[in-house]
Image: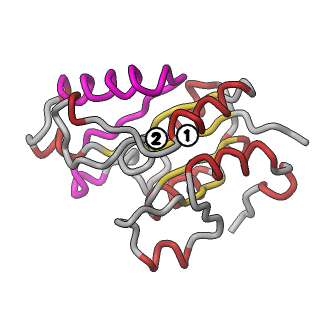
Amino acid sequence: MNTPRAILFDRDGTLVVEVPDNPDPTAVRTMPGALAALDAARSRKIHIGVLSNQPGIALGSLTEAAGHAVDAQVERLLGPFDTWQVCPHAPADGCSCRKPKPGLVLAACRELGVEPRHTFVIGDTAADVEAARAAGAVGILVPTLSTARAEVEAASWVETTLVDAVHSVIDATREDLTPSVQ
């Protein structure tokens, strides 16, 4: 079995309860199983990181400083991450980093020194899974009540919980997980 080199997590709706454009660190609440899932990856020396679209920065409803304060609270609650990649752009900006584009995944892989094909992205939306695919990584959807049914039906890998997703990555073989070239 070939252990994955990195697992990258969407922040809002995956690691912490989604609060749109949250400027308040005291409003951060972890998702069920988030710490256990991260600790499972950490115990196997797998790099972990966060990928987060934060359009509120570009739209003026969230400052960068407030975003950093929320990220710091996430780390206080869930422990350290090896990389943080944040897209501060609005959807209309056309940047290359906003999920579902691959920019955040590729930047994280560069920072970690890991090839995308040895990287997994876990999130609660199709944008997370599509960003993984576009980068050459493997995407896993962990739906929440906010995840559209069509997104669940379209995903090639769906897990019920974050803990299940991380354990599936840890337990699976690389041959089963290598992304197909389309």
Residue holding disc 1:
8
Q: Which mark is residue 104?
A: 2
Query: Could you say which quadrant of the image residue 101 lies in?
Result: bottom left
In front of the other: 111 or 24: 24
* Residue drawn at x 78%, y 55% as measured from the top left: 178
Q: Nearer the viewer, residue 148 or 88?
A: 148
Q: Residue furthest front?
A: 32
Asked whether, in this view, residue 46 is left or right of residue 111, the answer is right
Question: Where does the C terminus fall, quadrant-wise?
Answer: bottom right
The three-letter amino acid code for the residue at tag 2 is: Leu
x then y, percent, for residue 77: 40, 25
Compared to 47, does 128 lie above or below? Answer: below
**Residues in magenta?**
65-94
- The amino acid at mark 1 is Leu
The reply to whether callout 1 and callout 2 are in contact (CB within 8 Å) is yes
Circle 1 sits in a helix, a strand or a loop, which is it? strand
Comparing 70 with 115, the one in front is 70
